[in-house]
Amino acid sequence: MKYVKVTDREMIGNRVFDAHRELVWKAWTDPGIITKWWGPNGFATTTESMDLKPDGVWKFTMHGPDGRDYKNKIVYVEVTKPTRLIYRHAGDEGTEPVKFHVTVTFDEEGDKTRLMMRMVFETAAELQEVQREYGAIEGLE
């Protein structure tokens, strides 16, 4: 992201992409595309399943450069094509234990798209842990 703001319980990233909104939306919602870029540098992502609808689940594993696998589960709360995704990182048994809520907006700016991603954590300590343990700021950038 070109701009990242961190407060006590939230991280906000904001970036303008030189692409139409439909293409940026597709990069976030097509399992064949999102796995090519999701995560910090050096990580790879494998999607097990993605059901893009309210209460639908995206199960994926991030493979760290150190060989460690990080299983994740996202539950979609709102899917409003092509303007907004709201989801929660579940932190269920068998997945990374982190829980947070995310809102992603896709706003047209001529032929470009402004993407804003807001991650809200239950506590400041949880946000600090994902920054330290998972490289969350680098991942957002």
Image (spheres, grey):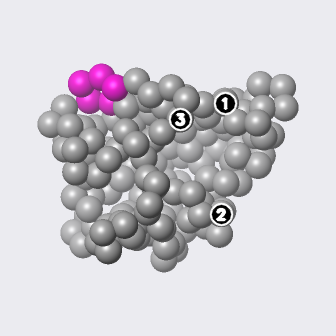
Q: Is residue 7 magenta?
A: yes
Answer with the quarter of the image where residue 52 lies.
bottom right
Q: Amino acid at mark 1?
A: Val
Asked if residue 32 lies left or right of residue 123, the reply is: right
In three-dimensional space, the C-alpha distance between marks 3 and 1, rounded to whole angstroms, equals 8 Å
Q: Is residue 35 left or right of residue 133?
A: right
Q: Position of residue 43 (x, y in %)?
A: 43, 63
Q: Is residue 66 highlighted in magenta?
A: no
Res 72 → quadrant: bottom left
Q: Secondary structure beneath disc 3?
A: loop
Q: Which residue is mark 2?
A: 33
Query: What's the residue at 70%, 46% (across, down)?
Result: 24
Q: Is residue 116 above or below residue 40?
A: above
> What label sits on residue 16 in the rendered view?
1
Q: Which mark is residue 1?
A: 3
Q: Amino acid at mark 2?
A: Ile
Q: Quadrant of residue 62?
A: bottom left
